[in-house]
Image: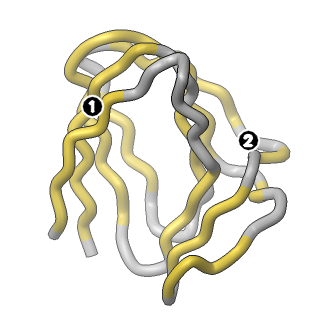
Amino acid sequence: MKISMVATSKEASPKAESHDNFNDLFLVQSGEEEFWVGGEITDKEETEKGEWLGQNLVGAQKYQIKAGDVMVVPKGIAHKHGTGSVIFLVIKIA
């Protein structure tokens, strides 16, 4: 298990990602922004074994997340957060 705290901002340029070997659990601590799940990653490249990054998502479902929300993204599912102002705790579970 890996735990990290992420803060996003309007200056951030988040990339789409997916992970072959673990699930992501996002616990939104504060703020609000858009979050996309599913679809296909454009310009996808493997940055390390089982870790994929790309510029954007095509065909993803958009959600509006805010403080108190929980988002679960299963392994192998592409996802991307927006450039709002939000802080979330990310727990990566194998």
Query: Which one is nearer the viewer's eye here, 7 or 50?
Result: 7
| Horizontal arrangement in the rendering, residue 42 relative to residue 16 (left or right) | right
Q: Which amino acid does label 2 sit on?
A: Ala
Position of residue 55 measured from the top left corner of the image (x, y, whole percent): 74, 51
Label 1 vs label 2: CA separation?
21 Å
Q: Residue at image x 55%, y 69%?
A: 76
Q: Quadrant of the N terminus?
A: bottom left
Q: Which residue lies furthest to the front in this view?
A: 11
| Quadrant in the rendering for residue 17 | bottom right
Above or below 49: residue 7:
above
Residue where numbered disc 1 is placed = 88
Above or below 81: residue 53:
below
Q: Label 1: few (<14), some or many (≥20) within 10 Å?
A: many
Position of residue 75 measured from the top left corner of the image (x, y, whole percent): 46, 68
Total tally of numbered discs in the picture: 2
Q: Quadrant of the C terminus?
A: bottom left
Query: Which one is nearer the viewer's eye here, 34 or 44?
Result: 44
Above or below 46: residue 54:
above
Q: Residue at image x 41%, y 80%?
A: 21
Position of residue 28 measured from the top left corner of the image (x, y, whole percent): 27, 25
Q: Residue 20 carries which label?
A: none
| Quadrant in the rendering for residue 93 | bottom left
Q: Residue at image x 54%, y 23%?
A: 11
Above or below 66: residue 71:
below
Disc 1 to disc 2: CB gap under 8 Å: no
What secondary structure is marked by label 2?
A: loop
| Horizontal arrangement in the rendering, residue 2 relative to residue 83 (left or right) | left
Q: Label 2: few (<14), some or many (≥20) within 10 Å?
A: some
Residue where numbered disc 2 is placed = 60
| Horizontal arrangement in the rendering, residue 19 relative to residue 21 (left or right) | right
Q: What residue type is labelled 1?
A: Phe
| Quadrant in the rendering for residue 41 | bottom right
